[in-house]
Amino acid sequence: MKQIAFLFSMLFLIIGCSGEDTSEEKEREIIETTFVPQNILFVGNSHTRFNQGIDFYLKGFLANLNLPYEPFIERSAFDGFTLDDHLENNTTLTKLGSKEWDIIILQENTFKATNDKLGAKVGMENFRFAINNNYTKLYLFLTWAYEDEPSMLPKITETYEETSSLLKANVVPVGIAFKNFKDINGAAINLYNADGIHPSIEGSFLAASMFYYAIYKQDPTSNSYNGLLDEETALLLKQTAKEVIDSY
C-alpha cells in the first residue's frame, strides 16, 4: 500500500510540474508574440513624400516616446507612381525584401483609386502577395480628394474600405480628416499645397498624427512634437487626427 501511495504522489507531482511548465510556456509564448511596430515601410507617391515625407513627421512624434526599441521607418515614394509601378521598381523591391517589415503602409495613386477601383484593389492585393511573410501588417493610406474635386472622396473611400476587408488591413482615413477639418475650420488653415493636389506642411503633419495614433495607440495631443508648426495649429491638427480615428 505504501508503494501505491508513493506512486500516486509521484504521479500528482509530475502532473503538477507539467501543468506549471505548460503555463509558463504559454506565458512566454504570449510575451514573444506581442506585436512590436518597430520596422515600418511607407510605399506611395508624392502624397507620401511631400514636405520631407510623412515618415519624417512620424519620426518626430516617436522621438518623444520612451520606446524600448529603436524604430526604423523607411519609405519608397516616387511622383505619380501606382502600386503596380512599385512592383516593377528595383528600389521598392529591394527595400521590400531587405527585412521582415512589421508594418507596410500602402498609398495608391489617388487618380487610380478614384477612377479604377478594381485596378487599385488588385494592385494592393498584389502587394500582399509580394510580402514574404504573414507577420507583416498592412495599413492602407486613404488619401484626400483634390481640393477642387471633393466628389472624389466617396470613391477613394470605397476603394480603400473594400480592399481592407479583402486583405484584413487597417485603414487610416486621412482623406476623411482633410474633409472634416476643412468643414469645421474653413480656409483658415489650408491642408493643401498651392496646386490643390499635394499636402501642405499642415496636411502632412495631420497625416503623420493619424499614423502615430493608429499604429502606436498614443494620443497625439499628449505629444509635444509640433514639427515646423506653431503650437496652436499643431494641437488643432492632432485633435482632428484623434477625433477622426476614434469615430471611424
Image (cartoon, helix red, strand yellow):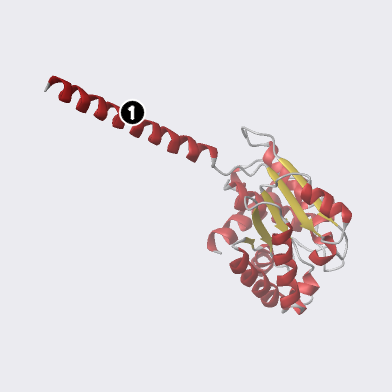
Quarter where residue 81 is shown: bottom right
Q: Position of residue 120 (x, y in %)?
A: 74, 72
Q: Residue 111: give x, y in percent of width and height.
A: 80, 73
Q: Which residue in the protein does label 1 denote?
A: 17
Residue lying at the far top of the rendered structure: 2
| Residue 200 visible (yes or no) | yes
In this view, the residue in front, 78 or 102, is: 102
| Image height of 90 relative to 17, above or below | below
Q: Which quadrant of the rendered structure holds the N terminus?
A: top left
Query: The C terminus is located in which quarter?
Result: bottom right
Q: What x and y, as percent, mark residue 4?
A: 16, 25
Observer able to see residue 82? no
Q: Is residue 240 left or right of residue 122?
A: left
Task: Looking at the picture, tell me which residue is in the foreground, 160 or 28.
Answer: 28
Q: Which residue is drawn at 87% across and 58% down?
A: 89
Q: In which quarter of the image is residue 78?
A: bottom right
